[in-house]
Amino acid sequence: MGESIIKNVNILTMNADKDIIEKGVVVLKDNLIHDMGNEDLLSKYPSDNIIDGKNGILIPGMINTHTHASMVVFRSLGDDVPDRLKRYIFPLEKKLVNKELVYLGAKYGIIEMLLGGVTTFTDMYFFEDEVARAAKELGARGVLGETIINFASPDSEEPYGGLDYCEWFIEKWKDDNLIIPAVAPHAPYTNDKHHLQLANKLSEKYDVPLMMHVAEMGYEYDQCIEEYDMTPVQYLDSIGILSERFISAHSILVSDKDIDILEKRKVGISHNVGANSKGAKGVAPITKMYEKGMKLGLGTDGPMSGNTLDIVTQMSLVGKIHKLHNKDRSLFPASEILEMATIGGARVLNMDNEIGSIEIGKKADLVLFETDSINMQPLYDYYSVLVYSSNPSNVDTVIVDGKILVKNKKLVESNIMDKVREQLKMIKNNILEVSKEL
């Protein structure tokens, strides 16, 4: 890919000191950040391959720490259905999900994430190999886990068939530069102790992430109390599967004791504020988690739950909901929220030595926000403008692994979007017909 330069940008490094470089310059070489600093670097690195940031804001690529991207094909269905997961989503998936749908949904969802400045996403679904194929074709970075569940699923005729699929999937993708395979048991209430421990052993064997929905549902919490006299977190700890490889999605119904356990085990927490609030599930106590210095990132959940896949939307919600819930407008300054969206997410994935901040030697995963649009001015505080004023349409340029994927707010390979839209139209009527029967 050679050498390229980004100039005339306000760099929010998101390093340990949250350094800001105004009128900054970043030099990229191949897929890494080679150098960075002020405008003096322009004379040191003469180049014909220069991106003029036009006084925009350059940040590390945002990280979506939990989603089910392929479910975008079901977005806006059943939004107000009580107990939607068991009554609506599971039956819908059983009837409709196949390889083609997963691939198409993943492609559409990844495009949405890229256009919104997400450069790395953490996904769990069925036929996860199709998600990996879509991510690889589009050039996105993904931490991808095959779902393991206690009933026959779209890609397995047998309960827990995801375990075998998962090992095959890990072997296939374990050495890829963009795809990190993972193990993804669905939840404590859809996996028994034996299979949870088998999933953990698989994660240990290949040293890959283990991701799961945890302490999300009221009935999940009640079941753990009734059967084990323990909360979901305490139960998972008692069977020995919590570790620094573990990514806990949601983590809403957790006690102070639970938080201590999660901290001790160095578990990564994916906070899905939009989906949690839309589902009326509660407000996760992330103020306590942040104060303890825990690994804390932001996620969207599936686009059928939160109806969006971008992290920009989540940032504003984090600030507003937690300030309201705690009746304290000083909570979570905008810089802390952007931290969760970038380097915080990288910590959750144990990738903070590679991505999540703009530092020499890290992967060139970068997002440029333009500041010319009316909603981006006046510009007094870079963090506040990004968190409370911006929206995904302000994302101008997206670079993943040193490659420009979005330029001037459009995919560089724009014909992909047209093809995906046409394919989506073809399956829409079938989805509507099936959904009417549920």
Image (spheres, grey):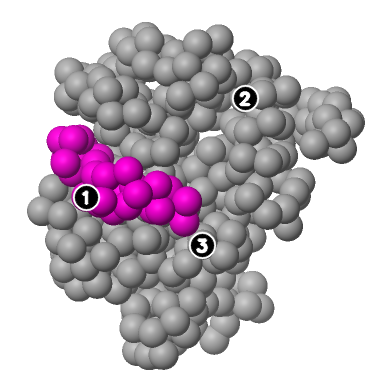
Instruction: Point out the tag, 1 or 2, that comes first from the N-terminus.
Output: 2
Determine whether the residue tagged by mark 2 lies in a helix, strand or loop: helix
Residue range (magenta): 218-246
Q: Is residue 276 visible?
A: yes
The answer to whether mark 3 and mark 2 are in CB contact below 8 A is: no
For badge 2, the amino acid type reads Val
Residue 223: within the magenta?
yes
> How far apart are labels 1 and 2 at the CA level?
34 Å
Crowdedness of circle 3 by 10 Å Cα count: few (<14), some, many (20+)? some
The answer to whether mark 1 and mark 3 are in CB contact below 8 A is: no
For badge 1, the amino acid type reads Gln
* The C terminus sits in image quarter: top right
In the picture, measured across the screen, residue 90 lies left or right of residue 430, that is left
For badge 3, the amino acid type reads Lys
Q: Which residue position is annotated with label 3?
A: 281
Q: Which residue position is annotated with label 2?
A: 102
Determine whether the residue tagged by mark 3 lies in a helix, strand or loop: loop
Q: Is residue 141 visible?
A: no
Image coordinates for residue 369, horizontal then vertical, percent: 51, 62
Task: Tell which tag, 1 or 3, sits nearer the viewer.
Answer: 1
Q: Which residue position is annotated with label 1?
A: 234
Residue 141 vs 332, above or below: the answer is above
The answer to whether mark 1 and mark 2 are in CB contact below 8 A is: no
> How far apart are labels 1 and 3 at the CA level?
20 Å
In the picture, measured across the screen, residue 10 lies left or right of residue 292, that is right
